[in-house]
Amino acid sequence: MPRDNQLEAISVKDAAKPSKRKSVPKENEDDSDSGSDSGSDISMLDVDFDFYNFNTDIDQIALKRLLRQTLSNDEDRIDVHPLAELILSEGIRMGAGSSIKTDGEDSDPWGLLAVIDVNRNRSNPAFKPFLDYIRSTLPSISPLRLLLDDSPSPAYSNSPALVFSLRVLNLPVPLIPPLYKMLLSELESADNKEVPKFTHWILWGRGYRLEGTEQGMGLEMTVENTGAGGKKKRKAKRNAVDALPASVGQFPYHPEEEFIDNVAAHIHTYPFKTAAPRDDDSFGVEQFGRLVLINHDNLAQAVQAMEAAGQ
């Protein structure tokens, strides 16, 4: 079934039109435009995006694919099957999280936003290998280690949630703020007493780095947003995140994560363990993993900034 709060999603769609993904049509050539270049007609493509609750029977295959995509070179290090099952079951247990689909509930999701309660699942065999993997990337002293390590510490009074924001890369960015808004609202209003009030969010994802030569080749990202007044284009050179060490040319794969980086308490990047070594002759983007620590209230602030930028 569609989301219980579908009315909220629809109102967001009507305001910013994220439910429609359209290519810009090229006008037909006519007699009055004899100086224009010859071109073929381009049809306008409409795609309706809907938000759904998680479905363990249907969403698992696509989720495993998205997990492998994010693990990149390290995909063989983690058995994504039990991890995907846990992500979906945690979302159902907490009544929080959403998938995005284009062809009804029985279709594969194009993306999803979900959380795992770290404290509850530290010893869960479906989660522990992944937790061990991301902890192995941390330096000996890190604010993330205080929240993720399983040794007894005062940090256990905190309640971190590991956030999985997974999607195909070309999913329209204006769809993402409603996902976060619904997630935060669902967790805040959860009737289940076993759902804690999370104190920290840890967003797991990946990024890429451009070499100096490639930065000069115009490989900036162009973001197209649909506003209430119709189609508008926003082309912006993406700035490096100041919090990242040696951050020149480093970007998250998902452009909306730059808004989260701006309010992050800590950003940790790590090389993939099985990536091929690079040298001076290497060309193309270099991928790496990312963990972003956000204090509880700051995530809502980042979502507001995302939403404002898309209008």
Image (cartoon, helix red, strand yellow):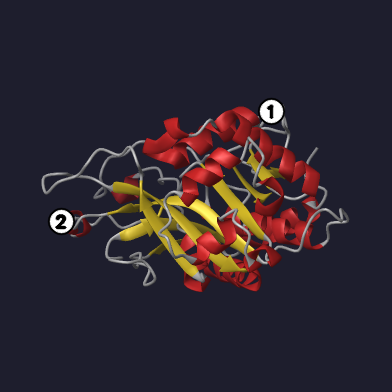
Q: Nearer the viewer, residue 27 or 31?
A: 27
Asked whether residue 255 is in view, the answer is: yes
| Crowd class of label 1 (few under 14; some 14 to 19; many from 20; radius 10 Å) | some
Q: In percent of the image, x 83 and y 57: which residue is there?
A: 190
**Residue marked by disc 1:** 58
Q: In percent of the image, x 46 and y 53: which residue is there?
A: 254
Count every numbered label the image shows and give the total: 2
- The answer to whether 184 is drawn above or below residue 110 in the figure is below
Please indicate whether residue 183 sits to the left or right of residue 216 in the image: right
Q: In percent of the image, x 56 and y 50: which residue is there?
A: 165
* Marker disc for residue 213: 2
Q: Residue type at mark 1: give it.
A: Ile
- The answer to whether 41 is drawn above or below residue 221 in the figure is above
Disc 2 is placed on an element classified as helix
Where is residue 250, by image quadrant? Answer: bottom left
Q: Quadrant of the N terminus?
A: top right
- The answer to whether 254 is drawn above or below residue 275 in the figure is below
Q: Quadrant of the C terminus?
A: bottom right
| Crowd class of label 2 (few under 14; some 14 to 19; many from 20; radius 10 Å) | few
Q: Nearer the viewer, residue 250 or 233?
A: 250
